[in-house]
Image (cartoon, helix red, strand yellow):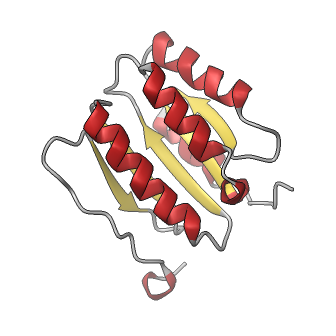
Amino acid sequence: MTESTLKPLKWQAEPGIGYTVQRRPDGGMHYVFTDVNEKTLRHWREFALQHLLDSDRLTRNLYDLRAVQKLPPQAIQVALELNTDPAARNIRLAVVVENEDVRRAIEEIEALTVPAGVELGIFTDIDQAEAWLSRPLTQLI
């Protein structure tokens, strides 16, 4: 995908949010979370919903949660809301974790995500996550 065909990111940093996001060369997004406080979750939810609103292609997203030690229940609820949005069927999502608590929380999200929602993979190695994301995309429903 060339830079001219990439959708605009429409992301603005704000004081107190614990994540950054960049456009991936394949058109998806690369999120790096360092904190999952309430302000971060609100900002992420609004940003993600805005992008789902005009989702028009199969997308590969990478979430790097290696700096996160624990996911609070509110983060799980926001993730479930986003994963069950009808536009999420167009997303392959690799999540990179560093500890078992976060892995278990992501597994819970995966188990509670409705079929035909986001395609989710959990990894401890970012290179393995990238390899999984690079597989050919297929429509999930």
Q: Nearer the viewer, residue 33 or 36?
A: 36
In the image, residue 141 sits, relative to residue 104, either above or below, namely: below
Q: Nearer the viewer, residue 6 or 90?
A: 90
In the image, residue 113 sits, relative to residue 13, either above or below, namely: above
User: x and y percent of residue 25 in the render?
Assistant: 47, 68
Residue 2 horizontal side relative to residue 20, left or right: right
- Furthest residue toward right: 141
Report the quarter where the N terminus lies: bottom right
Residue sitting at 57 percent across and 67 percent down?
53
Residue sitting at 31 percent across and 27 percent down?
67
Residue 64 horizontal side relative to residue 56, left or right: left
User: x and y percent of residue 40 in the render?
Assistant: 30, 40
Report the quarter where the C terminus lies: bottom right
User: x and y percent of residue 38 in the render?
Assistant: 30, 33
- Furthest residue toward left: 15
Residue 128 appears anywhere in the view: no
